[in-house]
Image (tube, rainbow, N blue to C red):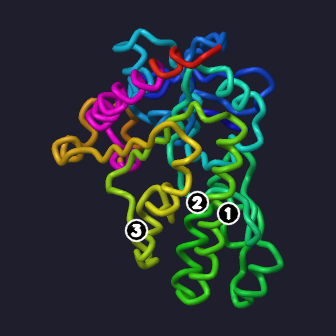
Amino acid sequence: MKHETLYEAGLSYAPCRYGTSRLFFRGPKKRLDGRHIAFVGGTETYGKYVDKPFATLIEESMVETCVNFGCVNAGIDAFAYDETVQAACRDARLTVVQVMGAQNMSNRFYSVHPRRNDRFLKPSTVLRAIYDDVDFADFSFTRHMLSALFQRSPERFAIMCAELRNAWVARMQNFLRLVGPNTILLWFAEHEPHDGAHPDSLMTLKSNPVFVSREMIEALRPMVRDIVEVVPTRGAMESGTDGMVFPPQEAAAAKEMLGVRAHAEAAKALRAPITSALLRNMKRPA
């Protein structure tokens, strides 16, 4: 698998692996000695084009070892079957799990690459039957495929959405059981979670985390210590790519990412819940 380059216009991601995991994570590599805080998530957790993503900022301000298990374009599937990540989370003082989109995971309609979860592999016979007028050989990425299917038939698309949402909740519940209840769930996006009545549209597919509603997140509340919602302020969004590091040819991609100020706001919002959770853990009976 091609992984992130060591340097990108001067920004070092120091990609590394842990244990037997086949995933590359953002470095530098840290010791998994049980005194760490684990951060699991997608592009936002990884901090694409950001020198100091929120996990690094928390490490610096709280003097805690923070291990960044973020992966670019990852969905929950990247971690749902990764025993190394799961063990590191179970052993951690605390785990922060980012809410990732529901489009990048295998389900009864289609399968995705086990590590590059945004890569569409193949449709199931069920999906072929529903969309018998579509040539799925035209698609390499999940979002492109879903956009095309919505445009072909919003009515048939609604069937897929219901499946993806149900599968996401089930996959997240299973992952949280595997890593244990010592977890904070993080919503880090440009908007608040929408309610279940939000209509599916092309805008839904452009709005990360794709398909995830407040109802779906609340279904996970009994399994975590806290849920933290971080929606960057207007000032953070208007700052755009200020302070981000990227090659000129990737300027358009950088504009789609949450920037330096947004990561600073996420770190600030997480500090109090993390501190509270760590104190509760210290008070637990041995």
The image shows residue 106 at horizontal and vertical percentages of: 73, 60
Q: Which residue appears at 55% of the width and 34% of the height?
A: 183
Against 81, residue 56 (above or below) is above
Q: In which quadrant is the N terminus drawn?
A: top right
- Quarter of image, res 194: bottom left
Nearer the observer: mark 2 or 3; the answer is 3
User: In the rendered structure, are the residues bearing label 2 and label 3 in contact, judged by CB atoms less than 8 Å apart?
Assistant: no
Against 260, residue 218 (above or below) is below
Location of mark 3 (residue): 195
Few, some or many residues within 10 Å of mark 1 (<14, 14–19, 20+): some
Q: CA distance from mark 1 to mark 3?
A: 18 Å
Q: Looking at the picture, tell me which residue is in the foreground, 282 or 102.
A: 282
User: In the rendered structure, are the residues bearing label 1 and label 2 in contact, judged by CB atoms less than 8 Å apart?
Assistant: yes
The image shows residue 167 at horizontal and vertical percentages of: 67, 63
- Residue type for callout 3: Asp
Against 185, residue 67 (above or below) is above
- Secondary structure under tag 2 reads loop
- Secondary structure under tag 3 reads loop
Mark drawn on residue 102:
2
Q: Which residues are magenta?
A: 252-278
- Secondary structure under tag 1 reads helix
Mark drawn on residue 167:
1
Which is the main secondary structure of the residues drawn in magenta?
helix
Whether residue 263 is in magenta: the answer is yes
Whether residue 98 is in magenta: the answer is no
Few, some or many residues within 10 Å of mark 2 (<14, 14–19, 20+): many
